Amino acid sequence: MESVQIGIIGGSGLYDMAEVTDRSEVTLQTPFGEPSGPYVLGTLRGKRVAFLARHGAGHRFSPSELNFRANIFGMKMLGVEYILSASAVGSLKEEYAPLHIVIPDQFIDRTKGRISTFFGRGLVAHVGFAHPFCKVLSRIAFDSGTRANATIHKGGTYVCMEGPQFSTLAESRLYRSWGADIIGMTNLQEAKLAREAEICYTTIALVTDYDCWHPDHDSVTVDMIIANLTQNAKTAQQIIAGAVDALPYERSCECASALKYALITRPDAVPAQTRQDLAPLVGKYLQTT
């Protein structure tokens, strides 16, 4: 199977990358089930990439239904070391207006019951997550947005809520009181799993609306969001393409060795099936003599 260094996850409104050429599709089975759909392999700015539509063809999966583990594990199986993720978000601050773009640097988790780890089943690992986004990749994405003349903000806290309903007014006001900046439904699990998979990860957050705290946006509709997403999609594609163009081949960040000191279980105590299933992640760390 072809090895691809760069992964792209498209969210609401970004179901394809028009600039990708030499396309082929690969369907993967992972130890965690099926990803959201086939990975589209192709060439973008002279580099091989793998594109995945997060919500499936035709936007069939809600945030709570997504098989995050399969989606990220599939990227790992393809050899991916960088993931650029695009995502629709609501704004919790006046200065982040619809059609703006945010490259967040922190998360608050408000999801319920989602599986956010590859580990368990006899193998325990605790990765560092104080800084949940790759600083190098985030800087490259921000610089690309600046070159694309986007109204782009560097840094910010992303509240990841369960959904699929939007926030209540009380919740929206609470998140603002916490100093949070944007709110979405998908990126936290991707970031946690990417860290466990030693993949660099960043989010290109596309602001579609003010959350319901705003007096003019107390009744957010899907139509409103889709209209803004359509406008933002072209900008997002420009940012992703520019970031792909600027990515270094060799990584210098800590993401590449996130598991080095994270595995707690004694190697000879790891069950054979778990060892086999997680070999793409931990094979190099579980050498026994």
Image (tube, rainbow, N blue to C red):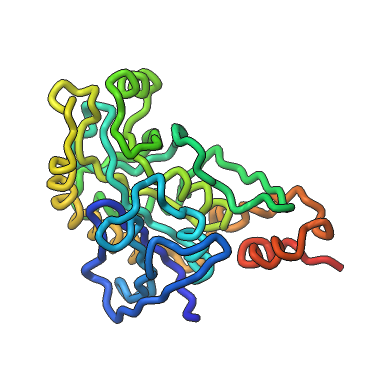
Q: Is residue 142 visible?
A: no
Query: Does 160 appear above or below 25?
Result: above
Q: Residue at image x 15%, y 52%?
A: 230
Residue 27 x/y as whole percent:
42, 73
Query: Does 44 appear above or below 255?
Result: below
Given residues 73 and 202, the one toward you in this image is 73
Q: Is residue 88 left or right of residue 122?
A: left
Q: Is residue 228 left or right of residue 121?
A: left
Q: Residue at image x 21%, y 26%?
A: 94
Q: Residue at image x 67%, y 61%?
A: 282
The total number of labels drawn is 0
Q: Is residue 129 visible?
A: yes
Instruction: State the image quarter where residue 36 is shown.
Output: bottom left
Residue 98 x/y as whole percent:
18, 38
Residue 265 x/y as whole percent:
78, 51
Instruction: State the image quarter where residue 48 is shown.
Output: bottom left
Q: Is residue 15 left or right of residue 64?
A: left
Query: Does 88 appear above or below 177?
Result: below
Q: Quadrant of the C terminus?
A: bottom right
Given residues 114 and 263, the one toward you in this image is 114
Residue 96 x/y as whole percent:
23, 33
Q: Is residue 276 left or right of residue 253?
A: right
Given residues 270 and 260, the one toward you in this image is 270
Q: Residue at image x 20%, y 55%?
A: 233
